[in-house]
């Protein structure tokens, strides 16, 4: 066992593991990459995290860099939950709901808490956390915070960043800070601190004040964005200041989150679902834009395309039996209203039906809870793609999660179909139509040299296409290692330099999840590509996407 492991074992209350089987287990996440950690730590409390960070800081001061990577359940598809140094694994111990105010709905949780368990508890109090990802059953809240996750309810409610009101964060040197929105007076106190926290506040405040014009360029014309660092929301015109939006979505590259304060919404179990079918993509785009303009928009506008339906029908024909039958339309959307007031919900559903009738869109409406759940199987059938094997070929997450301006939705769909044709790949699309945020996973064999080379050519074509449409390379899954190389292309040199400075302010020795988001190139990630892609560690759940 290394000296670092010995030190950590002597000073931490949580378990420290160096056995090859444990390290191998944590060498992959849900991405296409592989990197084996040197040490795996199961921290029991914040103090363990502080000591680990402090020790890495002291080693870095002497010229030895030992990376630290925070990890939940490893559902990250961007390669942000793997690392070569110390892996801090939170679900084992730091997995608790610490506080819940049933009146305000504000909850305080540890990062390793299972998202679904938290949601179940919230439901018993008539609340819910809306930006839950498709992986809710097996992912953690800490992972959602790291990636600024969102999901099928985000069209109405927004993303994780909109619900995180404060954090406890262990900084690179082991100091703990609490983030929340500070008044101008409170900020001045932080700026005067003679600690690393003070350095961070002074550094970020100066960076914002001196680069306001550049920061404005990070405002993309998309409904959600998890690319880069969110500087726009840190300092408001009234002088108030909050590091929280900067940490959310930073994927462990700026600090290690040990507590999360989240706001919640009132939960309405009763909803109204409309299933609409399209054979004209232009009509689909127009319909979605009209629905977006309603005074109270739907909570969801989700979609699957005909290719996905054909795939499911061919490989598991009973899955959609009685729900939708061939010949399939080019696009199916699920439009849901969840307004707390039954009267308002009914009124808004009627307005949506009026739009669909005006545009002559075939549709059906459902209010029965059991039948609604059945219809949602159409959208959730996308899981059939990621769990299917076509010989040695498997669906791999390399070109998904792009998001474009709503008015470019049809162009986006067309561009994806052309891309799959170019590489002679079978296509299947699903995602968040209301947000123009799509997911797709081509079938490739990573043990085949030709397919391994094809991975990076497909990625280049896809992400450059998304950028050319004025979109973001990631709406909800984060940059990680996968999309980090495209950040400079997305924002330009000036913004990229700002992001580099943000990273340097928080992590001057560059040991917090290095190689994720910033300063990552294709040459860095190509050697990390797996020889075979599996998500076996999720086999005890039913994966969704």
Image (cartoon, rainbow, N blue to C red):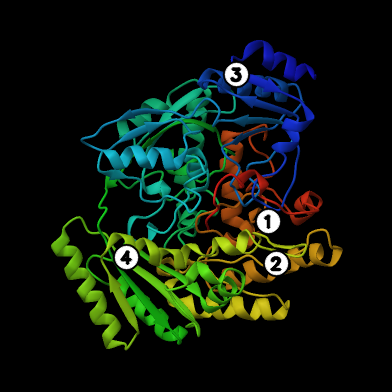
Image coordinates of residue 533 in percent, x first then y, are 73, 54
**Which structural element holds mark 2?**
strand
Q: Which residue is mark 4?
A: 336
Give the CA distance from mark 4 to mark 2.
31 Å
Give the CA distance from mark 3 to mark 1.
35 Å
Image coordinates of residue 113 in percent, x first then y, are 47, 34
Q: Which residue is mark 1?
A: 485
Circle 4: is it few (<14), some (14-19), or many (20+) Cα within 10 Å? many
Q: Earlier in the sequence, mark 3 or mark 1?
A: 3
Identify the residue shown where x is 57% and y is 40%. Answer: 73
**Which structural element holds mark 1?**
helix
**Between marks 3 and 2 in the image, the one whose residue lies nearer the viewer:** 2
Identify the residue shown where x is 50% and y is 82%. Answer: 326
190 above or below 357? above
Image coordinates of residue 276 in percent, x first then y, are 37, 77
Q: Quadrant of the N terminus?
A: top right
271 above or below 43? below
**Which structural element holds mark 3?**
loop
Circle 1: is it few (<14), some (14-19), or many (20+) Cα within 10 Å? many
Circle 3: is it few (<14), some (14-19), or many (20+) Cα within 10 Å? some
Q: Earlier in the sequence, mark 4 or mark 2?
A: 4
Give the CA distance from mark 3 to mark 2.
40 Å
Q: Is residue 242 visible to us here?
A: no
Q: Are marks 3 and 4 in contact (CB under 8 Å)?
A: no
Q: Is residue 515 left or right of residue 287?
A: right
**Which mark identifies residue 14?**
3
The one of 527 and 127 positioned closer to us in this rendering: 127
Q: Earlier in the sequence, mark 3 or mark 2?
A: 3
Q: Is residue 314 left or right of residue 146?
A: right
């Amino acid at each position: 066992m290394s000296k670092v492991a010995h030190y950590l074992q002597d000073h931490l209350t949580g378990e420290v593991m160096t056995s090859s089987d444990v390290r191998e287990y944590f060498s992959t996440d849900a991405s296409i990459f592989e990197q084996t950690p040197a040490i795996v730590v199961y921290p029991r409390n914040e103090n363990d995290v502080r000591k680990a960070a402090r020790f890495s800081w002291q080693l870095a001061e002497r010229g030895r860099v030992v990376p630290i990577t925070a990890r939940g359940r490893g559902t990250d598809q961007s390669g942000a939950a793997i690392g070569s140094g110390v892996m801090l694994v939170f679900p084992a111990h730091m997995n608790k709901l610490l506080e819940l105010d049933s009146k305000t709905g504000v909850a305080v949780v540890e990062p390793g808490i299972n998202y679904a368990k938290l949601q179940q508890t919230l439901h018993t109090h008539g609340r819910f956390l809306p930006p839950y990802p498709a992986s809710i059953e097996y992912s953690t809240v800490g992972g959602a915070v790291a990636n600024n996750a969102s999901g099928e309810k985000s069209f109405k409610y927004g993303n994780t960043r909109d619900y995180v009101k404060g954090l406890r964060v262990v900084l690179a040197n082991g100091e703990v800070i609490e983030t929340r929105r500070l008044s101008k007076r409170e900020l001045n106190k932080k700026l005067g601190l003679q600690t690393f926290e003070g350095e961070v506040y002074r550094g970020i405040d100066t960076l914002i004040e001196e680069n306001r014009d550049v920061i404005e360029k990070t405002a993309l014309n998309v409904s959600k964005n998890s690319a880069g660092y969110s500087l726009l929301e840190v300092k408001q015109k009234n002088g108030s200041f909050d590091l929280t939006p900067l940490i959310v979505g930073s994927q462990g590259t700026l600090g290690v989150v040990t507590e999360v304060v989240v706001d919640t919404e009132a939960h309405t179990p009763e909803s109204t679902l409309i299933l609409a079918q399209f054979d004209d993509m232009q009509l689909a785009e127009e319909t979605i834009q009209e629905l977006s303009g309603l005074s109270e928009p739907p909570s969801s506008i989700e979609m699957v395309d005909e290719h996905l339906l054909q795939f499911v029908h061919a490989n598991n024909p009973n899955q959609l039996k009685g729900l939708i039958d061939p010949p399939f339309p080019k696009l199916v959307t699920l439009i849901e209203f969840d307004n707390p007031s039954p009267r308002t919900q009914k009124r808004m559903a009627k307005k949506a039906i009026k739009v669909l009738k005006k545009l002559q869109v075939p549709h059906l409406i459902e209010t029965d809870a059991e039948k609604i759940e059945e219809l949602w199987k159409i959208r959730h059938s996308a899981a059939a793609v990621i769990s299917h094997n076509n010989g040695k070929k498997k669906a791999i997450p390399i070109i998904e999660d792009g998001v474009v301006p709503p008015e470019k939705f049809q162009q986006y769909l067309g561009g994806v179909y052309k891309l799959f044709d170019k590489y002679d790949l079978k296509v299947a699309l699903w995602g968040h139509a209301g947000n123009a945020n799509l997911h797709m996973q081509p079938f490739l064999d990573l043990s085949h040299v030709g397919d391994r080379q094809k991975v990076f050519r497909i990625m280049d074509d896809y992400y450059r296409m998304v950028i050319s449409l004025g979109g973001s390379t990631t709406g909800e899954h984060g940059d990680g290692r996968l999309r980090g190389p495209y950040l400079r292309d997305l924002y330009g040199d000036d913004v990229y330099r700002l992001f580099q400075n943000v990273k340097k302010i928080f992590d001057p020795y560059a040991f917090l999840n290095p190689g994720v988001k910033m300063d990552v190139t294709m040459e860095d990630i190509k050697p990390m590509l797996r020889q075979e892609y599996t998500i076996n560690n999720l086999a005890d759940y039913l994966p969704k996407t």
